[in-house]
Image (cartoon, rainbow, N blue to C red):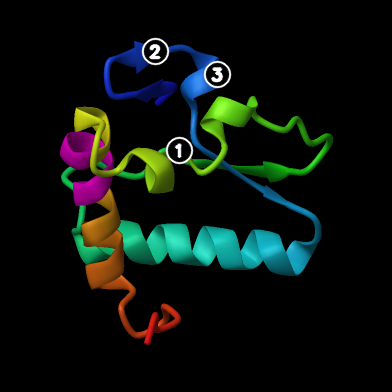
Amino acid sequence: MNRQGADVGTQYRSAIFYHDDEQKRKAEYYKNELNKSGAYEKPIVTEVTAFAKFYPAENYHQEYYENNKNSNPYCSVVIRPKLEKFQKVFSKKLKSNN
């Protein structure tokens, strides 16, 4: 909890911010499904919490993975394996890129 790779602190927590009960229900459902799938060694600690205010990230953080996936080792070593696991577990629910 409260970390991404070597970075630690509450600013590095993962969260899903919902706007209504239906979004909250879906977020909790899929978090539980992913935990039950065994795709990850440890339980997912992403918090599911009510939306309050949106703070846009700085420009250099926008589309970070997409803009750096082939040039930044963090993207290939940390992010890509997580995306691949997610895609494997939820392949039937993802939109096709075809």
Q: Quadrant of the C terminus?
A: bottom left
* Secondary structure of the residue carrying numbered label 2: strand
| Amino acid, disc 3 | Gln
**Residue 84 belongs to magenta span:** no
| Amino acid, disc 2 | Val
- Vertical side of 58 occupied by 70: above or below: below
Q: Pointers 3 and 1 in contact (CB under 8 A)? A: no
Q: Which is more toward the observer, 18 or 94?
A: 94
Q: For mark 2, what is the residue?
A: 8
Please tell me whether mark 2 or mark 1 is closer to you in this view: 1
* Secondary structure of the residue carrying numbered label 1: helix
Residue at 75% over, 30% down: 55
Residues shaded magenta? 76-81
- Return the x and y of residue 74 as percentages of the image width and height: 24, 30
Q: Locate residue 23 relative to residue 84 in the image: left or right.
A: right
Q: Which is more toward the observer, 84 or 69?
A: 69
Q: Pointers 2 and 1 in contact (CB under 8 A)? A: no
| Amino acid, disc 1 | Tyr
Q: Pointers 3 and 2 in contact (CB under 8 A)? A: no
Q: For mark 3, what is the residue?
A: 11
- Return the x and y of residue 84 as percentages of the image width and height: 22, 59
- Return the x and y of residue 10 as percentages of the image width and height: 53, 17
- Vertical side of 36 occupied by 56: above or below: above
CA gap between label 3 and label 1 equals 16 Å
Q: Main secondary structure of the magenta part?
A: helix
Residue at 78% over, 43% down: 51
* Secondary structure of the residue carrying numbered label 3: helix
Instruction: Name the mark on residue 64.
Output: 1
Q: Which is more toward the observer, 74 or 92?
A: 74
CA gap between label 2 and label 1 equals 19 Å
Q: Locate residue 1 relative to residue 56 in the image: left or right.
A: left
Residue 1, quarter of the rendered image: top left
